[in-house]
Image: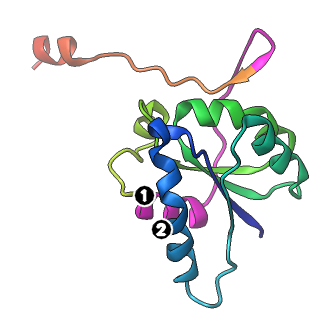
Amino acid sequence: MTSLILINPHAAGGRARRLMHPIQAWSQALPSQSEQPQILAPETIEAARYVLSELPPHTRVVVVGGDGTLNQMLPALLQGSHQVGLVPYGSGNDGARAWGLHSLSWQQALAHALTARSSPIDLGWLNWQTRLSIIFIPVWPWALTHQ
């Protein structure tokens, strides 16, 4: 299966751009029997969406960025029926927290995103645009009163 690592160079205030070379070095160190993922860092949303539109269907796409990056790429990811992995590198990372990825290093998250079995997630439609929504309900008041 083909894999693409799609880095948003503007994520985390531009700090994600600095991951390009470390990710390239990390992927080159993969075992020789592993297929080398393609690694791209398009400068614009439009360029990233175009890259996604040119991929074969069902490509595994690992997004390096945060919730905003994932939401911007979601329509093109759905259009291609791609499998999606996330390396959390944004400012909020609510999605990463919901999926249990927030405590992983980028190396651990990347290894997981490239090799883990995919599973479906729920998506919502709002104003005719696809959005990934992470909803957290604070439970600590309940926990304090129900010991």
- The secondary structure type at the circle numbered 2 is helix
- Nearer-N-terminus badge (2/1): 2
Q: What is the C-alpha distance between the residues marked 2 and 1? A: 10 Å
Name the residue that disc number 1 marks.
106
Q: Give the percent coordinates (x, y) of residue 45.
A: 73, 36
The residue located at (77%, 18%) in the rendering is 129
Q: Position of residue 118 (x, y in %)?
A: 64, 54
Relative to 107, say whether 15 is above or below. Answer: above
Which portion, as a residue range, is magenta?
A: 107-129
| Quadrant in the picture for the N terminus | bottom right
The label nearer to you, 2 versus 1, is 2
- SS assignment at label 1: helix
| Amino acid at the residue labelled 1 | Trp
Q: Amino acid at mark 2?
A: Pro
Q: Residues within 10 Å of mark 1 (few under 14, many from 20)?
A: some
Residue 88, compared with residue 138, is above or below; it is below
* Quadrant position of residue 130: top right
Q: Residue at x 71, y 48 (%)?
A: 42
Identify the residue shown where x is 65% and y is 30%: 71
Question: Where does label 2 land, which residue?
Answer: 22
Front one among 65 and 86: 65
Q: Quadrant of the C terminus?
A: top left
Is 91 colored magenta in this rendering?
no
Measured from the top left, where is residue 113 in percent x and y?
56, 58
2 and 1 marks in contact (CB < 8 Å): yes
The residue at the point 64 percent across, 82 percent down is 34
Mark 2 residue crowding within 10 angstroms, few (<14) / some (14–19) / many (20+) = few
Q: Residue 20 vs residue 106: left or right?
A: right
Considering depth in this image, is 145 or 43 the residue closer to the camera?
43
Asked if residue 78 is positioned above or below residue 92 in the image, the reply reads below
